[in-house]
Amino acid sequence: MPVSVILPIMGRSSGNFFGRDSLIMSLPIMPMERAMSDDLELEDCIDACDDCASICLESLTGHCLPAGGKHVEPRHVILMLDCVDLCRTTADFMRRGSPNHARLCAACADICDACAESCAKLDDMEECVEACRDCAESCREMASAAA
Amino acid sequence: MPVSVILPIMGRSSGNFFGRDSLIMSLPIMPMERAMSDDLELEDCIDACDDCASICLESLTGHCLPAGGKHVEPRHVILMLDCVDLCRTTADFMRRGSPNHARLCAACADICDACAESCAKLDDMEECVEACRDCAESCREMASAAA
Amino acid sequence: MPVSVILPIMGRSSGNFFGRDSLIMSLPIMPMERAMSDDLELEDCIDACDDCASICLESLTGHCLPAGGKHVEPRHVILMLDCVDLCRTTADFMRRGSPNHARLCAACADICDACAESCAKLDDMEECVEACRDCAESCREMASAAA
Amino acid sequence: MPVSVILPIMGRSSGNFFGRDSLIMSLPIMPMERAMSDDLELEDCIDACDDCASICLESLTGHCLPAGGKHVEPRHVILMLDCVDLCRTTADFMRRGSPNHARLCAACADICDACAESCAKLDDMEECVEACRDCAESCREMASAAA
């Protein structure tokens, strides 16, 4: 039985969480294990986006700017800022349980790939490359799961 | 002669603007009028995104929340917040002259359409509907111009 | 009769604007002209914050990054990014009619001053200096008006 | 020997991290253990701000909006949005190693306290109350440490 739209629901809270229950009750019927694995994937993707945004911003100001040279070329810095912004926005779409989160995840995956590629050409940016690739992969899964 | 990628350039400053010149010199050759009309479209689209974000946020807190009832249904409020966030992010991609701005514009157009539709069902949200539709149209043009 | 806390209310909409009316009705009685001049100051301050954020971000990516040298020193770039972020956040506090907007305006004024000072030492950043100073002045007025 | 300004430096990376070294070399001499405990406090405060922002946004859309009634009163929702925004901005000031982060931490502490108070009056918001109080405490420590 296909479920066309799955409204993602946050799972930080346990216990009697009103919002959770009332949202679940408004969802189309779906097998429970499906919903649970979706929840886990969603939380993983939020974490990947958060990590990517944090590491890119810290690397930009703590590594690229002091390093100078190719590390501060406009195209690279702009990509880093794009990546920070879009990872944040995408994570927030998921946190809000937005029905449009898959659209953002797809875009975020592409920008993260581009950022990873730009970072991979520069010295000492392995951590940033890895965070971008992890985020791209996780976002791509979210985007295709919802398609 | 097709120009596959046009790096948008901000035009607030006049005079001897380093960034502008050095960016222009790195661009593929293109007819000057093409570049100028692109600049104008870009500024229009930034304005449309800014207006949409501002009006949606003001309407949410100044109109929807006090009105209550259908105006505070989760799906509607979430869409309003999605719209505010994505319009901001999209405008900033354009402001930074990001080569990936068209990707964001395409997503932004869809979310603005969804927000306009949600607002159109509610009382006294004409201003918000109009801002969302204007932004969707402008973003769609930017997205297709860069395709 | 002094009014200690004035919940600012946005004034973009005219006509029968539910949110506006219901908020106004919950306000302490105050002379109408006082409320109106407060509204104007608030809108001016929002505009000043928006302009400052936009101009700083465009200058950073369109001027400082391509210029290189002192324009990309970590301390300067970090200040520019601080300024962009805080101007946005402060404007949104005002747009939401937050009772805490004055707190943000006070902090924003200081960061804008610091950013203006940093920009003033660099070539071709007059527009940015002016936007920061205008924003600092406007935020300082908002902060003291609410004190 | 007092150190009046300590530029906070992110510590996610280990190994040969250019940014880190070059920033450290530009710092005033300070006892190593002082710098290290400052680093830890900074990371704790960033985490507290991140958690508070995430939990408030998830609670707002996943709990308050579906619950309705007092949970969607304008003043409460506005405070929640204020708190999300300012926690984000404050965390980013720290992530960038901004010399102005203490200013933001002081403001953030106050808004988090106000948000905790608003949440404490409502059902099933214990998690949000706790996150706000933790963040307020951590921010207050950061603010006073830098004073």
Image: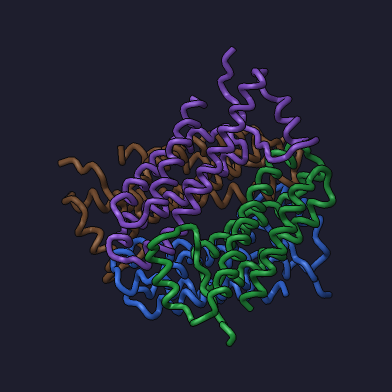
Chain colours: A blue, B green, C purple, D brown
* For residue C7, side relative to residue D2 (left or right): right
Query: Is B4 placed above or below A67 here?
Result: below
Picture mark count: 0
Query: Is A141 placed above or below C74 here?
Result: below
Viewer-proximal residue among A72 and C69: C69
Looking at the image, which residue sits at the far top? C1
Q: Position of residue D104 (x, y in %)?
A: 42, 42
- What residue sits 80% from the left and 35% below the top? C16
Q: Quadrant of the C terminus of chain D?
A: top left
* For residue B14, side relative to residue D82 (left or right): left
Q: Quadrant of the N terminus of chain D?
A: top left
Residue B71 position by quadrant: top right
- What residue sits 50% from the left and 39% below the top? D133
Q: Position of residue A126 (x, y in %)?
A: 38, 75
Looking at the image, which residue sits at the far bottom? B1
- What residue sits 60% from the left and 38% below the top? D79
